């Protein structure tokens, strides 16, 4: 059973860069045909897909966030990293990492709350 755990600072100041890590256990992030996604949910709103990194390292980004988002991986640590630059209070959300294959988002982390505030 694959487990995903998000970690990172709970509070970020406006204009700074948010950095989150998703640590994966019970499965390799390089396993064929799996994609590792970052998804967020602002308070009172629906889920927003931010981007993903595939098993081969290819990255995909939401057009709305592409200019501010970077997703990378550390295969030695089996971790996925999200960086979101120039954050504003509108980036306040619960951030999730999720594993997907064939449009089936079958495994999710518990999520981590990030608040952007001075």
Image (cartoon, rainbow, N blue to C red):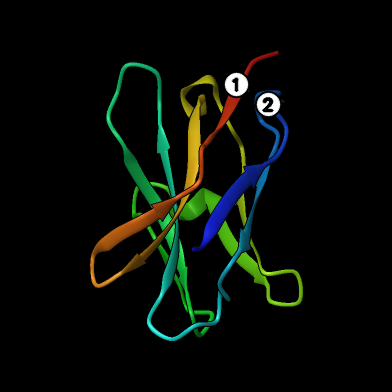
Answer above or below: position of 63 versus 41.
below
Residue 22 in the image: state x and y as whole percent.
Answer: 62, 53
Residue 27 in the image: state x and y as whole percent.
Answer: 56, 72
Image point (64%, 15%), residue name:
117
Residue 2 in the image: state x and y as whole percent.
Answer: 51, 62
Between residue 73 and residue 4, name the one nearer to us: 4
- 50 on left or right of 72: left
Identify the residue under disc 1: 115
Locate residue 57: give its quadrant: bottom right
Residue 9 in the image: state x and y as whole percent.
Answer: 73, 32
Between residue 46 and residue 34, name the one nearer to us: 34
Label 1 to label 2, Cα distance in Å?
A: 6 Å
Q: What secondary structure is found at the residue carrying circle 2?
A: loop
Mark 1 packing: few (<14 Cα in 10 Å), some, or many (20+)?
many
**Disc 1 vs disc 2: Cβ atoms closer than 8 Å?**
yes
Query: Which dot marks residue 22?
Result: none
Q: What secondary structure is found at the residue carrying circle 1?
A: strand
Query: Which dot marks residue 10?
Result: 2
Between residue 98 and residue 44, name the one nearer to us: 98
């Amino acid at each position: 059973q694959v487990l995903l755990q998000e970690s990172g600072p709970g509070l970020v100041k406006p204009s700074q860069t948010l950095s989150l890590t998703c640590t994966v256990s019970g499965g390799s992030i390089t396993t064929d045909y799996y994609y590792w996604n970052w998804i967020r949910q602002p308070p009172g709103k629906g889920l927003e897909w931010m981007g993903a990194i595939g098993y081969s390292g290819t990255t995909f980004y939401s057009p709305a966030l592409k200019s501010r988002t970077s997703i990378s991986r550390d295969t030695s640590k089996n971790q996925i990293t999200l960086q979101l630059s120039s954050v504003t209070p509108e980036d306040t959300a619960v951030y999730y990492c999720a594993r997907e294959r064939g449009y089936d988002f079958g495994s999710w982390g518990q999520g981590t709350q990030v608040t952007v505030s001075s």
